[in-house]
Amino acid sequence: MITTELKNNNLEPGLEFCKYDESFLEMSWKWLTDPEIKRLTMTPDFTREDQGRWFAGLPAMKGYLIWGLKCNSTPIGAMGLKNLTAVDTEYWGYIGDRRFWGMGIGQRLMQFALEQAMRLNLKSIYLRVHRGNDRALRLYEKSGFDLEREDADVRIMRRKLER
């Protein structure tokens, strides 16, 4: 796993990006097995054993960065950059704690992801989003992502990064 220094610029008081640890792993099980969150994030079926193997393999993963997001020390979501190359990366992220939906925190996830991609001197960042995830689609469009292509129920969107 690639490591990068955490910076919490421009975050509201109480919000903190941090290392994705066992507390996030446990919460992610709860979040990603919730039928609505699973559908919106397009999460495939997985077992606790699958999840454990994935977590154990994080330190050796190439081209993969992951952070947890806490609000007042409570895990509320996770985000990352994957499929990292010399020129681009794929963003993923979610707020798993429904109490924090609709509060603009997704914008903070996106802002942090863009900052990290720019620190890595990438030329673009892309993402995959379920075409029925209207809230996320609005966020991504507002964040400067353009539709690149559509595959079945998935939209692939990309944003060029300017220095």
Image: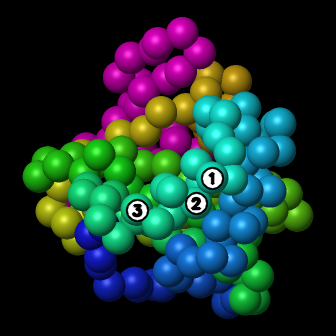
**Residue at x-position 19% and y-position 66%:** 120
Q: Nearer the viewer, residue 64 or 132?
A: 64
Vertical relation: 80 (above or below) 18: above
- Determine which residue is flagged by label 1: 49
- Determine which residue is flagged by label 3: 57
Give neighbour class at mark 2: few <14, some 14-19, many 20+ (Cα, 10 Å): few
Identify the amino acid type marked 3. Gly
The answer to whether residue 68 is seen in the rendering is: yes
Numbered mark located on residue 52 in the image: 2
Q: Which of 10 and 69 is in front in this view?
A: 69
Where does the image place residue 93, in percent across and percent down from the top left? 56, 53
Vertical relation: 42 (above or below) 37: above
**Magenta residues, start to end:** 139-163
The answer to whether residue 162 is seen in the rendering is: no
Left or right relative to 106: residue 148:
left
Tell me the distance, in whole angstroms, between the alpha carbons under discs 1 and 2. Answer: 5 Å
**Residue at x-position 54% and y-position 74%:** 20
